[in-house]
Image: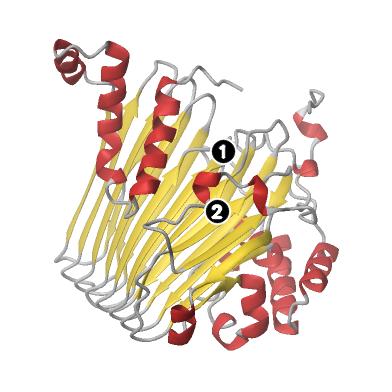
């Protein structure tokens, strides 16, 4: 499918949705009145907020005006089926079983299962539309009220008004979900989807969940406007992995935030491989005494991809600890930007915050930027940050070649070794292998300028 060349002014500068889209969505989903009302309240806020632009600090280095909003209509998922999803994304994460599986194609649930053991424990793992109808007391007080909020920005408000699908995981107090949970959001059609992830762990609960975001290659533009909310109660332990591999015509705008309670732990792993332009806000709020949060991010941009990750580690209680590491590579004419901030509130003493951005520049025309930052309002803290840039080191390449390994293979091995530290933080060997294959395809692939 091809498109005629058009002037930028010929396309709307903002999405062209209307309140009628909200009513149509709510009616189709048979949503409760409280949800329909909350959507309209968010829409009112959305209309009041301006579109972000280059004069806004968070956006001044990222130009998303290439998106054609008139083609970003909500996707019609009437014909969506399971058989289009790649086989490797349907395999159990470990062994031959998992705690639950939820697969969306173009925003429609095409496969769902959860073990009887989890049901008996009171664990709720289901799609968000169903959860809003069947568990309103659990969802209503959490959905975009504690973590991501409509007031976070134009795209957050739009998401709150028009989210199309999502997953809800709730683990009751003291329950441990031993087998991992797996969610796949697969998009095949042009247009826009607005996916949501809401995870809530009560006191002393634990769980591990992986969410895959991906789409097949195509020539038509797509948009994903997403939100992720991770609510980790006191002494709870959540391991969350989110891996994205959109096609080269997808624009992603997402808000992701975790809130961590007293003595609780959030281990968060992110991977960004696909998309034409990605703008992701990633925040950890350490709310309780001695809360801990670790964020591990990896990305590889090639062709003319643009990845913009904006991270924040907020220490809202004493004795909290955050550890953030982003590793990325760029080749061809790709661009990447990481903006990070560690912030401590007044009187939040004895905190330990660390952030690092490690960047591997693999071609002369690629550009990578990293902007670490500290905003400290307490006087007994340990907060450090670092950013490094480099090209492929010749010494280890030469060493491997001296052992009889051809240069292309040696360069591949060194580049893969750069990412290995983060790959090992993913608790699923099969997923690690899948990511290694994706990295290898980018490293040795032909120039994909589009």
Q: CA distance from mark 2 to mark 1?
A: 12 Å
Q: Position of 297 compared to 161: left or right?
A: left
Outermost residue on the front side: it is 96
* Residue bearing the label numbered 1: 275
* Residue bearing the label numbered 2: 254
**418 or 112: which is nearer to us?**
112
- Splitting the image into 4 quarters, where does residue 378 fall? bottom left
| Numbered disc 2: secondary structure | strand
Residue 58 appears in the rendering: no
Task: Indicate the position of residue 445 as horizontal and vertical percent values.
Answer: 47, 21
Task: Indicate the position of residue 192 as horizontal and vertical percent values.
Answer: 71, 50
| Numbered disc 1: secondary structure | loop
Q: Position of 61 compared to 220: left or right?
A: left
Q: Position of 146 compared to 260: left or right?
A: right
**408 or 419: which is nearer to us?**
408
Q: Quadrant of the N terminus?
A: top right
Task: Indicate the position of residue 228 as horizontal and vertical percent values.
Answer: 51, 62
- Residue at position x 70%, y 78% in the image: 35
**350 or 180: which is nearer to us?**
180
Task: Indicate the position of residue 267 as horizontal and vertical percent values.
Answer: 32, 61
């Amino acid at each position: 499918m091809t498109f005629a060349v058009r002037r930028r002014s010929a396309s709307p500068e903002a999405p062209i949705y209307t309140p009628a889209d909200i009513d149509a969505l709510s009616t189709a989903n048979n949503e409760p009145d409280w949800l329909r009302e909350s959507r309209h309240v968010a829409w009112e806020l959305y209309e009041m907020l301006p579109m972000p632009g280059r004069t806004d600090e968070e956006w001044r280095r990222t130009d998303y005006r290439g998106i054609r909003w008139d083609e970003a209509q909500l996707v019609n998922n009437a014909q969506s089926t399971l058989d289009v999803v790649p086989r490797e994304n349907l395999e159990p994460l470990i062994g031959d079983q998992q705690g639950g599986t939820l697969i969306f194609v173009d925003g429609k649930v095409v496969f769902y299962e959860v073990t009887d053991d989890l049901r008996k424990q009171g664990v709720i793992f289901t799609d968000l539309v169903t959860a809003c109808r069947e568990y309103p007391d659990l969802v209503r007080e959490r959905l975009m009220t504690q973590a991501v909020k409509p007031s976070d920005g134009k795209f957050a408000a739009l998401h709150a008004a028009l989210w199309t699908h999502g997953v809800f995981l709730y683990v009751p107090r003291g329950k441990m979900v031993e087998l991992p949970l797996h969610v796949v959001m697969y998009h095949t059609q042009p247009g826009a989807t607005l996916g949501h992830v809401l995870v809530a762990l009560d006191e002393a609960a634990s769980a591990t969940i992986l969410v895959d975001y991906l789409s097949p290659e195509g020539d038509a533009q797509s948009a994903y406007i997403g939100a992720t909310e991770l609510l980790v109660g006191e002494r709870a332990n959540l391991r969350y992995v989110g891996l994205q591999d959109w096609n080269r015509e997808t624009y992603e705008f997402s808000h992701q935030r975790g809130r961590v309670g007293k003595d609780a732990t959030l281990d968060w792993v992110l991977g960004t491989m696909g998309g034409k332009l990605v703008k992701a806000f990633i925040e950890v709020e350490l709310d309780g005494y001695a809360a801990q949060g670790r964020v591990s991010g990896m990305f590889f941009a090639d062709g003319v991809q643009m990845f913009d990750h904006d991270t924040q580690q907020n220490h809202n209680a004493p004795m909290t600890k955050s550890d953030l590491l982003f590793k990325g590579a760029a080749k061809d004419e790709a661009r990447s930007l990481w903006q990070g901030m560690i912030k401590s509130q007044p009187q939040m003493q004895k905190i330990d915050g660390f952030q690092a951005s490690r960047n591997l520049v693999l071609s002369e025309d690629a550009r990578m930027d990293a902007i670490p930052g500290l905003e400290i309002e307490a006087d007994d803290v340990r907060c450090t940050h670092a950013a490094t840039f480099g090209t492929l080191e010749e010494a280890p390449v030469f060493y491997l070649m001296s052992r009889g390994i051809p240069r292309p293979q040696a360069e591949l091995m060194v580049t893969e070794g750069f990412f290995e530290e983060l790959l090992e933080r993913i608790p699923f060997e099969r997923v690690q292998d899948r990511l290694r294959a994706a990295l290898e395809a980018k490293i040795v692939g032909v120039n994909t300028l589009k």
